[in-house]
Image: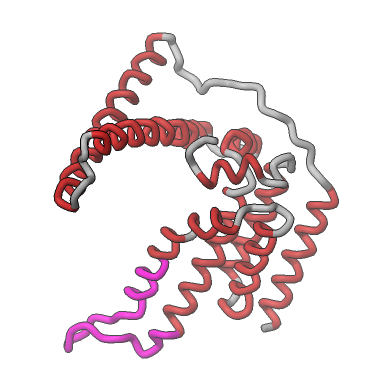
Amino acid sequence: MTGLAVDDAAWASAWRRRSPADKLLLCGGLVVCALALPAWPGSVLVGLTAVVLALGPARVPARTLGRAVRWPLAFILAGALTSAVTVGTGGLGWAPDAAARAGSLTAHALAGSAAVLLLACTTPVSDLLPALRALRVPAAVVEVAGVTYRMLFVLLASLRAIREAQTARMGHSTWRRSYRSSGALAAAVLTRSWDRARRMQEGLAGRGMETGLRVLPEVLPSSRAFLAASAAGLAAIVAVGVAG
């Protein structure tokens, strides 16, 4: 258990042993379809396909998928609300096509988010980073992504330790104490994480680490059947989306 529900789901997924490149092709194609096709029926088909694949063949727990989509959904709804509002001489008001605009934005964003979550819940980051290198993504981008991923666990460990100490001292026994403890928790976690990152940078610089840390990645073979099924499914979604 890593402490991240999405990461745990990726390691336990039935698609864990599939090639990351195959899953990148499928999920990337779904994202492109979600952005390019009309909201109805294109984005709806993309979202349903991603959810069915995640809950069915990939065996991602429904609870994990539901929890993962909560925060993206909140941002999507906020964006849809602001897109439906206009500012004129009379002040704020609803756009003439507010419902259509908000609905289209929500459909596109939800479908794209579902496709990205399908990749996140089936592919560990340790598999994804070597695949990005193979696809000629700039090394600096891959290194920043890897360091950010590792720092997440430092943040989680610090957050857990400090919160347990606060709880043991009755720091969350009342709303007032909980509010104060939450502020102290945020400050302590940020300070400790910043200090840990600085010491890590100094340690790597002292060892002459001027390039990325090279490791031997696990080779996962590509599946022609999976690629063919992915291409056929994407083609069907495009055909139905364009025809609709």
Which is more toward the observer, 196 or 83? 196
From the top left corner, tell me how far across and down residue 21 is, in percent. Answer: 69, 44
Q: Is residue 95 inside the magenta stretch?
A: yes
Which is more toward the observer, 63 or 141? 63
From the top left corner, tell me how far across and down residue 219 is, in percent. Answer: 73, 31
From the top left corner, tell me how far across and down residue 190 is, in percent. Answer: 27, 35
Which is more toward the observer, 230 or 164? 164
Kindly identify the residue that appears in the image at 52 percent across and 60 percent down.
Answer: 66
From the image, which quarter does the N terminus lie in?
A: top right
Q: Which residues are magenta?
A: 76-99
Kindly identify the residue that appears in the image at 57 percent across and 61 percent down.
Answer: 114
Would you identify the image quadrant in which residue 54 lies?
Answer: bottom right
Q: How many marks?
A: 0
| Furthest residue toward top | 207
Q: Is residue 138 inside the magenta stretch?
A: no
Left or right of 133? Residue 21 is: right
From the top left corner, tell me how far across and down residue 58 is, in percent. Answer: 70, 52
Would you identify the image quadrant in which residue 196 lies?
Answer: top left
Left or right of 227? Residue 62 is: left
| Furthest residue toward right | 225
